[in-house]
Image (cartoon, rainbow, N blue to C red):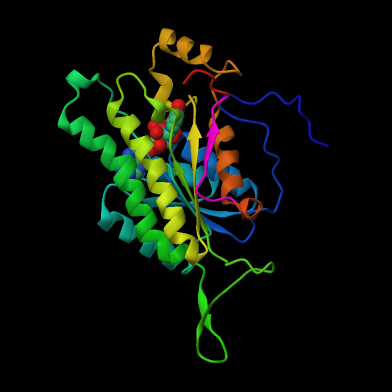
Amino acid sequence: MIDNEVTPAPGRHPGFPAGSELHTGRTYLVTGAARGIGRASAEVLLAHGATVAIADVDEEAVTTTAREIRALPVVLDVTSRASWEQARDVLTGEFGSRLAGLVNNAGITRDKTMSKMDDTMWDGVLDTHLRGTWLGCQVMRPLLAAPSIRDETGRPTVVTDAYGRPAGGAIVNTSSSGRHGSYGQTNYSAAKAGIVGLTKTIALEFARFGVRANCVSPGPVETGMTADVPDDVKAKWLDGLMLGRMGLPHEIGTATAFLLSPAASYITAQVLDVNGGEWHP
Ligand code: NAD
């Protein structure tokens, strides 16, 4: 029996029952997972039987978190191709050449209104979100692609699952409700809107490898990223949300875990808004 009356610990979401085997035998990489939404996504996947590598540029934090949640730590700067290639080699060494899913979640904000934003702030945010997501999808694609084997005539044939579906992996990229426009965040809004276009094109190009690609698009979530936002700004956010509260990291993680799972096998090129019902974005 699921006890819906359980009071969650601060920052914890009680609504994902552990013990399902939806992700058993499957391996994942989640970026920006030393804390926040990335950590929570990794925890949801682990709770459902997955083996998870968590990657972050913050070496100390990712090592500690990995120990706490029992994941494999990977030091990765998503803005660097060389760093992605190193991460790919670590994964291949640990997990072999197959990855069931990649979550491009790492992110930063560098907010200023347009007249005060400088090149460093623009480049830093675009590099982390947009270039980082692009690089991750490109470098990890061979591990996500459905393997092919030679049939009796020697022709390569894509391996399929029990239902005849190409046995490829899935990608979840992280957009934001900020993609609709967000005061003081031209860099962030541009990057998050770009991630939607990037994901839809990747979905189109990677379909032939049996790889699905979707976006999760959170509304405001209680993490370090939003901790310093002034109360009056947060109050305005809540006014625009049907549920009238900020999201918890695991509420994004459950959506991500669904999109990665075989239960979402016919879903690709979509944006799943997880935002408490935004009604005036
Ligand atoms: P967070 O600040 O709590 O965590 C972000 C993590 O990304 C950190 O651990 C950080 O070290 C890591 N990171 C930053 N730059 C990196 C790099 N170059 N390489 C590797 N790791 C790097 O943030 P969060 O709130 O958990 O956000 C996670 C994602 O969700 C981000 O993409 C963010 O834009 C998005 N998002 C967050 C919210 C929100 O309200 N918190 C809303 C919409 C979207």
Q: Is residue 270 magenta?
A: yes
The quarter holding residue 87 reads bottom left
Residue 134 position within the rendered picture, expressed as x and y whole percent measured from the top left: 34, 50
Q: Is residue 66 above or below residue 187?
A: below
Q: Main secondary structure of the magenta part?
A: loop
Q: Is residue 78 visible?
A: no
Residue 275 in sight here: yes
Towards the viewer: 65 or 151: 151
**Relative depth, front residue between 34 and 132:** 132
Counting from the top left corner in percent of width and height, residue 192 is at: 37, 36
Furthest-left residue in view? 119
Vertical placement of 28 versus 186: above or below? below
- Point 51% across, 72% down: residue: 147
Quadrant assignment, res 250: top right
The image quadrant where one finds ligand 1 is top left
Left or right, residue 275 beside residue 106: right
Q: Residue furthest right?
A: 1
Is residue 130 covered in magenta? no
Q: Position of residue 248 (x, y in %)?
A: 55, 28
Residue at the (32%, 56%) spot, across then down: 84
Which of the 4 image quarters holds residue 90? bottom left
Q: Which residues are magenta?
A: 267-276
Q: Residue at x 35, y 40 (%)?
A: 194
Q: Quadrant of the N terminus?
A: top right
Residue shown at the point (62%, 61%) measured from the top left = 25
Q: Residue 122: x, y in percent?
A: 22, 32
In the picture as drawn, the residue positioned furthest to the top comes out as: 232
